[in-house]
Image: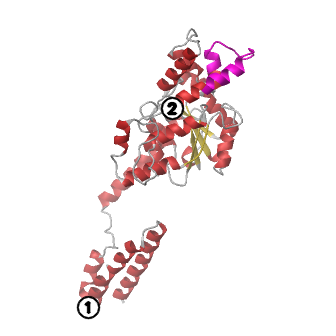
């Protein structure tokens, strides 16, 4: 009876393994060999009953129980991880009753200053456009550039040119300068000029597969796509590995260095962004909530289940207005004081690791 019971148990377990492998799209050939592994163990059990305990120990489907020390170590690791997450959430919270961001169904990101370290590219492109329009005399330095990053590109460029809202030429000049800036800016995107901050790619890879991703920038949508493509290499039309958009020859060599699995993973990472928008493809730029609401709608998500991550007060205000959870990062263009004074964020992160602990994880 024990042999029969054990045999049935093995068969039941094998059925479970086969079902799991089928669900993960493993080819049938991967399931058949495992089934064949059952035969020698069943035959041995039937022929030599005394060997039954040996069969149980040696079966490839019977994992040995954890020792007391190993079990304690595993429980301690889980407890430590949970405590660490709770501690980080508490230290980053800027509201009295912060929402549970780790349970979010969707995570949306700003681009510049949040995902990508691209301020030097933006600054130099701004200086170039102003000089090309004989506006080199305009007050311009790195501090002024950072302070104006709260505005969408047309308004930012008009202000850099010395115009203020209400001036006759403010809107038209802003649109034209913004158009020139976008053309110049997007063409220069690469992993060198707009690379992800260290650790950001790991955050994106670690988000569970059922969590939907999106991006909303106050630059043009083409820029958002260019940055994501530059940091997430895609496959060439021939099916081989290809460099990311905007990369030079050295970057191409780097992109071709990995194996097929790595390239597939990177391609899938970019492909996971179900919506990418800029100020030119939404009804109004941030701090309006319209862009985030459009992204949530395209992802088929309730905005209340989404987190928006950004580095500017306008990002937090847009998230609040949209009913989303808001996480601010302090490695972008704005100081911690400015971000806190905005009173628009649920959390503020000083490090990428803190951000990782606030988001859903595999």
In the image, 50 versus 319, the foreground residue is: 319
Name the spot of residue 79 as percent of width and height, x first: 42, 50
Q: Quadrant of the N terminus?
A: bottom left
Q: Please tell me whether the stretch drawn in magenta is mainly helix, strand or loop.
A: helix
Height in image: 52 above or below 63? below
The answer to whether residue 344 is seen in the rendering is no
Name the spot of residue 327 as percent of width and height, x first: 56, 36
Height in image: 52 above or below 17? below
Mark 1 and 2 residues: CB-CB less than 8 Å, in contact? no
Q: Residue at x 52, y 23 (%)?
A: 125
In the image, 75 versus 153, the foreground residue is: 153
Residue bearing mark 2: 187
Q: Residue at x 45, y 40 (%)?
A: 231
Which residue sits furthest top?
Answer: 137
Q: Secondary structure at mark 2?
A: helix
- Residue 13: image quadrant is bottom left
Instruction: Answer with left or right where residue 201 lies relative to residue 319.
Output: left
The answer to whether residue 21 is seen in the rendering is yes
Is 279 contained in the magenta span? Answer: no
Is 177 contained in the magenta span? Answer: yes
Height in image: 218 above or below 160? below
Name the spot of residue 288 as percent of width and height, x first: 69, 33
Q: Report how far apart the C-alphas of labels 1 and 2 lie in the structure.
A: 74 Å
Instruction: Answer with left or right where residue 9 lies relative to residue 131.
Output: left
Foreground mark, 1 or 2, reads 2
In the image, 9 versus 253, the foreground residue is: 253
Q: Secondary structure at mark 1?
A: helix
Q: Residue at x 65, y 46 (%)?
A: 296
Residue bearing mark 1: 47
The region drawn magenta spans 157-179
Name the spot of residue 7 as percent of width and height, x first: 37, 84
């Amino acid at each position: 009876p024990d042999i029969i019971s054990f045999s049935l148990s093995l068969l039941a377990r094998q059925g479970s393994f086969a079902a799991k492998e089928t669900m993960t799209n493993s080819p049938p050939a991967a399931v058949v060999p495992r089934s064949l592994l059952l035969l020698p163990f069943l035959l041995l059990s039937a022929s030599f009953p005394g060997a039954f305990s040996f069969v149980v120990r040696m079966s490839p489907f019977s994992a040995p129980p954890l020792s007391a020390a190993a079990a304690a170590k595993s429980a301690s690791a889980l407890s430590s991880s949970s405590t660490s997450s709770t501690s980080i959430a508490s230290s980053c919270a800027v509201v009295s009753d912060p929402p549970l961001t780790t349970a979010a169904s969707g995570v949306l990101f700003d681009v510049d200053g949040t995902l990508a370290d691209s301020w030097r590219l933006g600054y130099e492109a701004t200086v170039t456009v102003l000089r090309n329009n004989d506006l080199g005399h305009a007050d311009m330095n790195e501090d002024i550039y950072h302070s104006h990053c709260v505005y969408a590109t047309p308004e930012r460029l008009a202000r850099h040119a010395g115009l203020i809202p209400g001036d006759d030429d403010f809107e038209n000049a802003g649109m034209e300068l913004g158009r020139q800036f976008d053309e110049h800016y997007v063409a220069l995107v690469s992993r060198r000029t707009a690379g992800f901050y260290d650790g950001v790619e790991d955050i994106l890879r670690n988000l569970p597969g059922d969590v939907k991703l999106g991006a909303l920038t106050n630059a043009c949508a083409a820029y958002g796509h260019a940055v994501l493509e530059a940091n997430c290499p895609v496959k060439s039309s021939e099916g081989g590995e290809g460099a990311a958009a905007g990369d030079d020859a050295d970057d191409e060599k780097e992109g071709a260095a990995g194996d097929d699995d790595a390239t597939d993973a990177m391609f899938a990472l970019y492909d996971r962004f179900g919506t990418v928008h800029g100020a030119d493809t939404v009804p109004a730029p941030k701090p309006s909530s319209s862009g985030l609401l459009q992204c949530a709608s395209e992802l088929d998500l309730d905005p209340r289940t989404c987190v928006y991550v950004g580095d500017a007060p306008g990002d937090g205000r847009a998230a609040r207005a949209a009913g989303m959870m808001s996480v601010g990062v302090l490695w972008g263009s704005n100081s911690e004081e400015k971000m806190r004074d905005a009173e628009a964020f649920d959390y503020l992160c000083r490090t990428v690791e803190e951000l990782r602990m606030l988001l859903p994880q595999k």
